[in-house]
Amino acid sequence: MPEVDPRAACEAGHLARLRGIRRSRAAFHALAIGVFALGMVMPGAVRPAQADDPQIQLGKALFKSNANPPCSTCHTLKDAEASGPIGPDLDELQPTKDQVLAVLRDGLGVMPSFAETLNQSQREAIAAYVVWATRPR
């Protein structure tokens, strides 16, 4: 059997690993670009909500005046032109959808529960709207 130089074998193995890593990175980047491109052009792909989204519009209407009492009575939210002095400023708080849903369902402090006055889809619309309105677009 021919003698193998251990140093040469080590360098060859290291180079092969580096080539593999480079190929893996290139494949990952190609995949990521493809997924991003598909999300941009495929109908039905998940996209951030827009102002004209029906759920966002319903949530805004409920927030401003259709809930009883309206959220805008107590809360500040720039997009809704609301400056309620009682509840937290939602633009500053930037609650998650789950946080909004929990508070709408259970109430918190002086805020009442809306579990009896708003159905689940209405509460989800308000939560979606609050999250949409408080995040940069």
Image (cartoon, grey):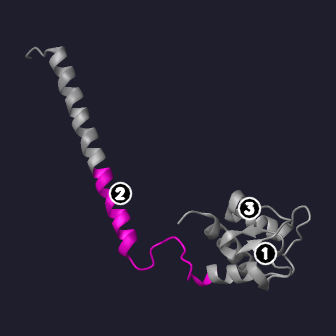
Q: Residue 20 placed where, x, y %?
A: 25, 39
Of discs 2 and 3, which sits in the foreground?
A: 3
Mark 3 crowd level (few <14, some 14–19, many ≥20, 10 Å Cα): few
How far apart marks 2 and 3 lie (CA) works out to 31 Å
In the image: residue 50, left or right of residue 32: right
Q: Which mark is residue 72?
A: 1
* Label 1 with label 2: CB-CB less than 8 Å: no
- Which disc is residue 87 wearing? none
- Quadrant of residue 14 within the rendered picture: top left
Q: Earlier in the sequence, mark 1 or mark 3?
A: 1
* Magenta span of residues: 27-55
Number of marks in picture: 3
Image spot of residue 136 (x, y percent)? 56, 63
Where disc 3 sits, the SS reads: helix
Q: Callout 3, which amino acid? A: Gln
Q: Amino acid at mark 1?
A: Ser
Q: Looking at the rendering, which quadrant does residue 35 occupy?
A: bottom left
Say which label, 2 or 3, has the lower sequence index.
Answer: 2
What percent of the width, then of the height, locates residue 76? Answer: 76, 67
Q: Mark 1 vs mark 3: give the one in front.
A: 1
Horizontal and vertical percent for residue 93?
72, 58
User: Residue furthest toward the left?
Assistant: 2
Label 2 is placed on what type of residue? Ala
Q: Which residue is mark 2?
A: 32
- Dot 3 corresponds to which residue? 99
Closest to the observer: 83 or 68?
Answer: 83
